[in-house]
């Protein structure tokens, strides 16, 4: 098996580069699509109270226009505007998981746009005169809600209301002209939503790719040193607070320099990826594994005793020993040495615990490699 194709396949599998993540922006996976939708709903929920209130105030202030167009009808239209805006203002409030942000947004938009359409229909020629405002409010909605199915659902009732009232109060030619303008604006709003959705999806995926790159080692796909240390400090603090067990393994590939010297650095890179996969496959979901140096790795095992960690380390050692990496220069095999340290009161922070595991790893190297060594206990 050639080394370079293996490298490319692993890069795609782990999505370890920003370019690979951005390339997938046009066709996000199910998990990414769900995360994108959650992010959109979060943005909408954060903006709805402010933008909804601005929308409501604008609808009520249009009463001035009512007085200018038809003073005799203005009192009724103002009362209608105010009533519907107050009903829609319930959507500004976060009702928790009982009411989704989609329903809140629908309540705000339907009541507020309905107030504009209904009040305009009560004025002589009002629907035609208010057409720019009625169609204009589609575009802010398209910027906030770029998902076409939701956008059309939100616009369904106001559009039907506009068509029904237009048929009732407008002459046929005025109705036809108004509907054509309305449909043209609806199409433009849909195009705006599509463009906005693509830009926001690309930005979202780029942000996720950058976060992934910051948290993961670009070669192996396992956790990067900084992120692993951050997680480990948190878990160590919890373990010390609640008196729970925690163990750390430090691993090193034996004679790794020989692999680079004899088979070349591409083979060494491929071997690091294979070792990472082999070790990660032996861990529980609560454990995590990271690369902290050239051929050095650390595994953190919360809720794990010393003996449980030793059993897991033996599984990792055997899994790595079973690797047979085919290269143009011949098959590559390797072994690993592992040092284990279990959390004790003397380990005041993760650095001290990791140093104990490193000392055990050194003993494993000195005593012949390809073995697991437990750190000496400092307390009973």
Image: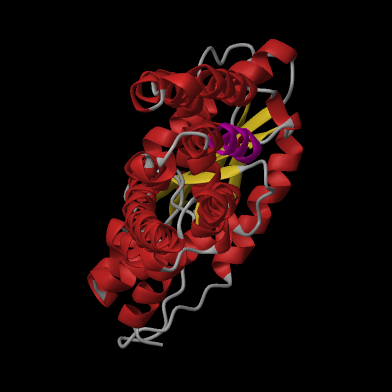
Asked whether 108 falls inside the magenta stretch, the response is yes
Q: Residue 257, located in which quarter of the rendered image?
A: bottom left
The residue lying toward the viewer, choosing from 227 and 244, is: 227
Image location (x, y in percent) of residue 40: 48, 42
**Position of residue 34 in the picture relative to residue 128 (left or right):** right
Image location (x, y in percent) of residue 230: 46, 28
Q: At 62% from the left edge and 33% from the top edge, which residue is drawn?
A: 104
Q: What's drawn in magenta, residue-wise? A: 102-111
Q: Residue 215, located in which quarter of the rendered image?
A: top left
Q: Is residue 167 above or below residue 123?
A: below
Is any atom of residue 292 visible in this view? Answer: no
Q: At 38% from the left edge and 34% from the top edge, which residue is drawn?
A: 226
The residue lying toward the viewer, choosing from 196 and 21, is: 196
The residue lying toward the viewer, choosing from 198 and 215, is: 198
Colouring mode (rainbow / by chain / secondary structure / one colour):
secondary structure
Q: At 56% from the left edge and 21% from the top edge, which residue is drawn?
A: 76
Is any atom of residue 45 visible in this view? Answer: yes
Q: How many marks?
A: 0
Image location (x, y in percent) of residue 170: 47, 52
Magenta stretch secondary structure, dominant: helix
Image location (x, y in percent) of residue 30: 57, 62
Q: In the rendered view of the protein, which quadrant contains the C terminus?
A: top right
Asked whether 77 falls inside the magenta stretch, the response is no
The residue lying toward the viewer, choosing from 69 and 248, is: 69
Q: Is residue 102 above or below residue 170?
A: above
Q: At 47% from the left edge and 36% from the top edge, which residue is drawn?
A: 120
Q: In the rendered view of the protein, which quadrant contains the N terminus?
A: bottom left
**Position of residue 8 in the picture relative to residue 112 (left or right):** left
């Amino acid at each position: 098996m050639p080394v370079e194709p293996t490298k490319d396949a692993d890069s795609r599998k782990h999505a370890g580069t920003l370019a690979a993540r951005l390339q997938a922006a046009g066709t996000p996976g199910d998990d990414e699509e769900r995360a994108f939708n959650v992010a959109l709903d979060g943005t909408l929920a954060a903006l709805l109270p402010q933008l909804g209130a601005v929308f409501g105030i604008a609808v009520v202030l249009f009463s001035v226009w009512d007085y200018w167009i038809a003073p005799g009808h203005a009192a009724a239209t103002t009362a209608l505007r105010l009533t519907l805006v107050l009903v829609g203002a319930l959507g500004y409030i976060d009702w928790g998981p009982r009411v989704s942000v989609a329903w809140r947004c629908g309540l705000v938009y339907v009541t507020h746009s309905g107030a504009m359409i209904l009040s305009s229909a009560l004025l002589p020629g009002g629907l035609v005169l208010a057409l720019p405002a009625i169609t204009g409010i589609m575009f802010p909605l398209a910027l906030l809600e770029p998902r076409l199915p939701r956008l059309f659902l939100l616009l369904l009732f106001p559009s039907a209301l506009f068509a029904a009232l237009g048929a009732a109060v407008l002459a046929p030619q005025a109705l036809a002209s108004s509907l054509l303008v309305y449909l043209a604006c609806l199409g433009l709003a849909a195009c705006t939503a599509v463009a906005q959705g693509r830009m926001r999806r690309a930005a979202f995926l780029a942000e996720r790719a950058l976060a992934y790159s910051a948290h993961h080692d670009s070669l192996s796909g396992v956790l990067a040193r900084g992120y692993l240390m951050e997680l480990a400090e948190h878990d160590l603090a919890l373990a010390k607070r609640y008196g729970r067990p925690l163990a750390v393994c430090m691993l090193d590939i034996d004679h790794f320099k020989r692999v680079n010297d004899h088979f070349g650095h591409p083979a060494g890179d491929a071997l690091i990826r294979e070792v990472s996969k082999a070790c990660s496959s032996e861990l529980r979901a609560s454990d995590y594994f990271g690369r902290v140096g050239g051929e050095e790795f650390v595994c953190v095992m919360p809720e794990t005793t010393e003996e449980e960690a030793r059993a897991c380390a033996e599984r990792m050692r055997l899994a790595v020993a079973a690797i047979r990496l085919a290269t143009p220069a011949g098959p590559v095999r390797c072994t690993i040495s592992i040092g284990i340290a279990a959390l004790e009161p003397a380990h005041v922070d993760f650095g001290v615990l990791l140093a104990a595991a490193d000392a055990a790893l050194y003993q494993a190297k000195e005593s012949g490699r390809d073995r697991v060594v437990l750190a000496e206990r400092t307390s009973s």
